[in-house]
Amino acid sequence: MSQSIHRAALVLEHVSVRPRTQSEIAALLDVHRSTALRILQTLTEAGLTRRRPDGTYGIGYRLAGLASLAAEQFDLRDIARPTIAELGRECGHTIHLAVLDGAQIVYADKIESAGPVRMHSQVGQPVRLHTSGVSKAILAWQDTATVDRMLAGYEYERFTDTTITSREAFDADLAGIRERGWAVDDGEFEPFIDCVAMPVRDARGSVIGAVSITALRALADLDALEALLPRLAAATERISTDVGWRP
Amino acid sequence: MSQSIHRAALVLEHVSVRPRTQSEIAALLDVHRSTALRILQTLTEAGLTRRRPDGTYGIGYRLAGLASLAAEQFDLRDIARPTIAELGRECGHTIHLAVLDGAQIVYADKIESAGPVRMHSQVGQPVRLHTSGVSKAILAWQDTATVDRMLAGYEYERFTDTTITSREAFDADLAGIRERGWAVDDGEFEPFIDCVAMPVRDARGSVIGAVSITALRALADLDALEALLPRLAAATERISTDVGWRP
DNA sequence: ATCTGTGTTGCATAGTGTGCAACAGTCGTG
DNA sequence: CACGACTGTTGCACACTATGCAACACAGAT
């Protein structure tokens, strides 16, 4: 590993939190002031940091430019796949990854269970917003304007006795999800198929996706699924960390 | 300057365009394969690059995370100020910088001319969309949904004989702007005050702002302002480059 | 089975990144 | 206004790290 490059990366971490003076950087890295200056000069020449008018160093515009250029490479699905595969192996149920994709939520990935039942959810297809755990785990943490936009004209079609059929009831459900940190689908779309779901966050803490564990009630009822919440929490925290979120 | 850190920055530039193999990186940097591997290993450990399942290296999620964390530091106004100040000195007229700010366009900065006339545009205030050069230079390159959203319910108030007073005429004007690359305000808000404006782009080429040169017609008519277009083009290209755009 | 290209590792050393001393500039205090 | 403290900057000697090399492992093509 390259010590100099590692130090440069640490500089970027520190200045991304807030702009820092050269002496602060020297102290944080435990190096001499002249060493800090040279690291900052090189990073600034590359556009990764910039010297602000007040003499502090902040993140440079080119760093944002690089992230933008590479936007197509950031596929949550790729990064989440090993983690949800492991979760599927551990608990033996169907695992879904869904992502917020513009104004809709789509299934991004799916780990089929080894059991006799196949869930008919399809990767790439939109998620039904009012019944599925993943969509509720995403919507619960979106701002009101986004939720309003996504639910404008939405039809709360009844599928089973537990289907939510009004915006008021849906909002109440989302409030409960925010409170406890996870969502459920209590046979709301198909009788006897339940799931639990938790959100995936990006670097800024915004919810960009969700992962769920789904099972036929005869194999694992909601209590059994809720017992898996610690594993689900570990998986979504791992995925969030992998895409840049820090607790 | 640190050669190692400079090389790391070059690696980031190259892999942001598209994912690359380790050997490609070695060739691009003109270093040994083992050197390229160690640079990539250090960047990957820091999350700035990541090794994809196919063995190539792309930009890492943490880089996007750093840019997100630092989003509040990216103030187009700060970066544009020296360039528009120089443009103002060179041509002796009033210079405006406007930015796309959510669903509106606002004046972000203004360089007053040394002449007797003061434009009453105010930094921080919204721009009148159908008459000003900067707003048209921004709107011309927004997607239809954005333009529709911004112009929903908009009142095309007539101020002078040249004011545009319909959405159809406005759209035709925007089409002309796209074709020639710059916008004008031909006394559309106040008689005898004209301007030319050009767009500012971000790293992905999206138009995020515009710069204009405004003058009293008695001092510089539209022909005189159009003669300044090369200087205006150089200024907007400089600002765009400074915020990460590459031709 | 063989060849080629790519990825990886341990190691010696070329050469770079480092800290130091000295200097310059700024700001607060008396 | 002078002084001290702190921060920023530069040239330089050298400590030590980043480098290329050789050797090896592996995958894919022939």
Image: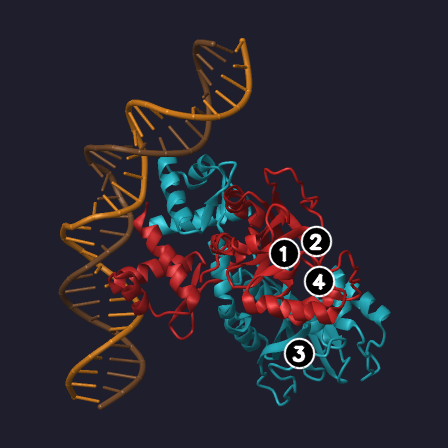
Chain colours: A cyan, B red, C orange, D brown
Q: CA distance from mark 3 to mark 2?
A: 51 Å
Q: Secondary structure at mark 2?
A: loop
Q: Are marks 4 and 3 on the same chain?
A: yes
Of discs 2 and 4, which sits in the foreground? 2
Mark 1, residue position: B134
Q: Earlier in the sequence, mark 1 or mark 2?
A: 2
Mark 3, residue position: A214
- Residue A133: quarter of image: bottom right
Of discs 4 and 3, which sits in the foreground? 4
Q: CA distance from mark 1 to mark 3?
A: 53 Å
Q: Secondary structure at mark 4?
A: loop
Q: Quadrant of the N terminus of chain A?
A: bottom left
Residue A12: % across, % down: 46, 49
Mark 4, residue position: A141
- Residue B172: quarter of image: bottom right
Badge 2 vs badge 4, beta-carbon distance below 8 Å: no
Q: Are marks 1 and 3 on the same chain?
A: no
Chain under label 1? B
